[in-house]
Image: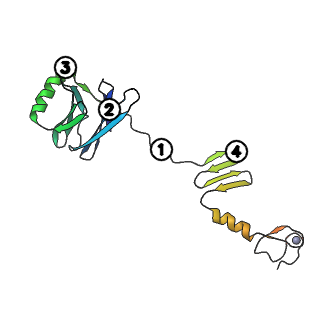
């Protein structure tokens, strides 16, 4: 679960926890520019959602993890991790005035796997690209050899010109012997 907090100066701070690693991403969205910097810290696995408080010099994020409490200090564009108890007391002081819980960020919806598309008697598959409409079939993609082989081995009756299967010994139309 990732959390995002808007810092109010055109920047946003997002946090994510994977295993013991907390990833802090500082993004600024000024006019005509978009900058993003990520920092990774070994903090342990979160046991509570992160809390953020504004300090005199920036922001402090409190993380409660399986390893105890740690604090991420954001000052300007620098992000640092500290687990000092002095951070805890200053965070407590800040908490009384400006603490607010971070809002969970909506997780990305996983991509739905491509389903074959079907409309009436038309069917379309992607990968390989294949389209069927009634008895018409259109295919492109990873089977060019098969269709190529069909074309090159196609035979026609020398008497009446009808298409015959390569395995046929006699023409199905006029019955003449196929050599
Ligand atoms: Zn024939």
Q: Nearer the viewer, mark 1 or mark 4?
A: 1
Query: Closer to the camera, 47 or 141?
Result: 141
Specify the quadrant of the image occupied by residue 36. top left
Could you say whether the residue bearing mark 1 is in a helix, strand or loop?
loop
The residue that mark 2 highlights is 4
State the CA–CA distance, disc 1 to disc 3. Answer: 42 Å
Mark 1 and mark 2 in contact (Cβ < 8 Å)?
no
Which of disc 2 and disc 3 is earlier in sequence? Answer: 2
How many other residues sit within 10 Å of disc 2, few (<14), some (14-19) or many (≥20)?
some
Q: Is mark 3 within 8 Å of ligand 1?
A: no
Name the quadrant where ligand 1 sits: bottom right
Which of disc 4 and disc 2 is earlier in sequence? Answer: 2
The residue that mark 1 highlights is 111
State the CA–CA distance, disc 2 to disc 4. Answer: 46 Å
- Taking 97 as reference, is 29 left or right? right
Q: Residue furthest left?
A: 86
State the CA–CA distance, disc 2 to disc 1. Answer: 22 Å
Residue 158 marker = none
The residue that mark 4 highlights is 120
Mark 2 and mark 3 in contact (Cβ < 8 Å)?
no
Q: Residue furthest top?
A: 97
Could you say whether the residue bearing mark 3 is in a helix, strand or loop?
helix
Residue at (19, 43) in percent of width and height: 66
Specify the quadrant of the image occupied by residue 47. top left
The residue that mark 3 highlights is 97
Residue at (28, 29) in percent of width and height: 102
Q: Residue 105, position in %: x, y?
A: 36, 33
Query: Closer to the camera, 143 or 10?
Result: 10
């Amino acid at each position: 679960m990732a959390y995002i907090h808007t810092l109010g100066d055109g920047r946003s701070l997002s946090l994510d926890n994977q295993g013991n690693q907390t990833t802090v991403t500082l993004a600024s969205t000024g006019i005509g520019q978009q900058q993003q910097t990520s920092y990774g810290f070994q903090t342990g696995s979160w046991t509570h959602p992160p809390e953020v408080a504004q300090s005199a010099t920036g922001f402090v994020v409190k993380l409660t993890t399986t390893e105890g409490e740690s604090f991420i200090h954001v000052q300007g564009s620098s992000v640092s991790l500290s687990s000092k108890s002095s951070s805890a007391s200053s965070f407590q002081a800040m908490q009384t005035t400006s603490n607010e819980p971070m809002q969970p960020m909506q997780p990305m919806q996983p991509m739905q796997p491509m389903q074959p598309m079907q409309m009436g008697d038309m069917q379309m598959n992607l990968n390989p690209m294949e389209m069927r409409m009634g008895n018409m079939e259109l295919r492109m993609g990873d089977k060019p050899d098969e269709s190529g082989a069909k074309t090159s081995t196609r035979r026609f009756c020398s008497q009446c010109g009808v298409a015959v299967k390569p395995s046929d010994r006699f023409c199905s139309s006029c019955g003449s012997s196929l050599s």
